[in-house]
Each structure stands twice: as structure tokens, then as C-alpha cells.
Image (tube, rainbow, N blue to C red):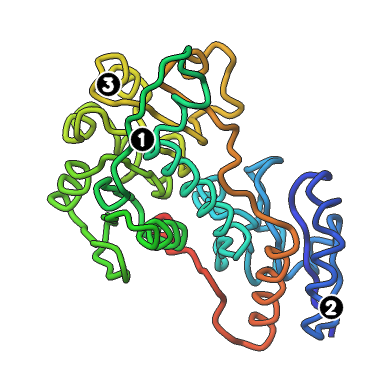
Amino acid sequence: MTTNVLFLSTPKRWSEYQAPLSRALEATGLDFRLGEDLPAEKVEYIVYAPGGATDHDFIQFPRLKAVLSLWAGIETVIGNPTLTVPLARMVDHGLTQGMVEWVTGHVLRHHLGMDAHILGQNGVWTPAAPPLAQDRRVSILGLGTLGCACGQALAGLGFPVTGWSRSAKSVEGITCLSGDEGLTQALSTADILVLLLPDTPATQNVLNAATIAQMPRGAVVLNPGRGPLIDDDALLAALDSGHLGHATLDTFRTEPLPPEHPFWAHPKVTVTPHIASETRPATASEVIAENVRRGEVGAPLLHLVNRSLGY
């Protein structure tokens, strides 16, 4: 019996995913039909990638079994009232590895003070060595798959890593905290703060004037998570006052970041254009195909979203 898989996104993404997704589905041994224009009454699985319309009517698919997101973030679809079937987010090796590389690279950049040397020192010889990693405290807000992977990579380099999550967790190599008191402790010990929380009503503006004030003077903020995690005005005020030393930002409330936004010209802000981690077609297709296979044999789907938590 044929399994019908609809690719619901933009034509550009379809051109990128058609071949690797076909190969991955073929490897499962399933008899399948994959396309971006299948009869709605036959669709059983939807491969969903934000970028086109986000107000899809999922009721039109009476045989739909699951929606499989190509992104880790599912905030554009989770609130859709017509989506009542299971929703799975993307967790794959390529996405995780990309995030580990971006976070590790920028933590080391700020730890070593590389900007001063790259931008030039005007002929002034300043032989001031940075502290060792063991003396630079890193806190990560968010201990999902990405937060844990980044934290363990940094711990492997010798950084003392504290992780905070809304619910209690235990991760090897990371001091794990939760709750309001745990958040205060994570912030107060963060020489470098990494934001990797999901975008939910409970996490929006988690970094605001009050929480920034709890951080050490001169601390650095890295945000490869979600733009709404930060109160932009509070962040700019803290940078202007010198309370924060720098902010390296990869995600923003509005993307692309408007040319007139003050982040672009601020001397203490580095903007990267949402490149910290990207879903790679080859590895993501394997995750999607495995979930389709599981759905067809009655096995539990991987990476299901908890709608009550928002991720």
C-alpha cells in the first residue's frame, strides 16, 4: 500500500529536499509517493518547513497522521487550531553539529579576545594573555538537544558550564539548575551567556532589564536561539552603560533584520544572519524518513512536541 507524503513549503526548499528525501524514504523499504502537490484526501504525512504561508488548514487532510517539521523551532505552526495530529520537530546531527560549531566558535572568540587582534592594535604591543577556560564561566539557558550538546562541547574544552532549564535536568559535565532561583544563579555566574531556549510565552523577554542586571559587569551575550528571548531596548541600554561587554546575535524578532535597526551600527553588537545552525537536507531527510517508517509500523514517533509546554 502506498504511503503519501506531502512536502509543504516553498519551491526552493522542494528543489533542495526532493532528491535526498526520496532517497531516504526509499531506504526504509516503504512504497511511497512524495510530492508538493498531492490530492489532499490522500495525504498521510506532511513534511513542513516554514517559509511560505503559515496559516495552513490541516482539516483538509482527512487521512493525515502526523506533521513532521524540518525546523527545530515550531512556533509558527504549533498554535494552528486545525493541527490536531502529532507534530514532530527536527532534531538531527547536522543541525546539532552546526549549532555546536557556532556557539563554540563565538565563545572562544570572546574568551580569547580575538576581536582586538583581528581589528588591529595600531602598532601597540599589548602582551595580555586571556585567562584559561577554567576561569571563564559559561551559562546556557535551555538544555534541550542543542543546549546539552553545546554545553558538553564547552565543558570538554575546560569551561565551567552552568545550564538552566524550566524543568529539572541532569546532564554530564554541566551544572544543571532550574526554577527562578536557578535562573538567578545561572545569570549571576555568566561571564558568557548563551541563549538556546525555545520561543514560548514563558520564555519571551527572558533577558530583560531585571535579568541583565543580575549578570556580571562586562559579560557577553550570545543568542543563537530565538529573537523574542531578548528585550532589545534593555540589551542596548546595558551595552551603552557598559554593564554588558558585547552581544553576538544570530536571531531577531524581525528577520531579515531591518537595515535601520540599531544592532547593525552598534560597536558592541555582532550580527550574524541566522546562520548558527541550518537544517541540512541529507541528514534531516533521514530523520523525516525514519518518522514516516515508525508511523507506518505503529512505533512511537521521534521528537514529538509537547503542546502544553510549547516545544
Task: Say which quadrant the N terminus sits in.
Answer: bottom right
Residue at which label 2 appears: 26
Identified at 65% across, 46% down, the residue is 50
Question: Could you classify mark 3 by the number of other residues whose Cα lies within 10 Å: few (under 14), some (14-19), or many (20 or more)?
Answer: many
Residue 221, numbered circle: 1
Residue at which label 3 appears: 238
Q: Nearer the viewer, residue 265 or 304?
A: 265
With respect to residue 187, does 310 lie above or below? below
Mark closer to the observer (2, 3): 3
Tell me how far mark 1 sits from mark 3, CA to CA: 11 Å
Residue 56 visible in the picture: yes
Farthest left residue in view: 181
Task: Say which quadrant the C terminus sits in.
Answer: bottom left
Q: Amino acid at mark 3?
A: Ala
- Place of residue 38 in the rendered image (x, y in percent of width and height, measured from the top left): 85, 61
Tell me how far mark 2 sits from mark 3, CA to CA: 53 Å
- Place of residue 17 in the rendered image (x, y in percent of width and height, measured from the top left): 80, 57
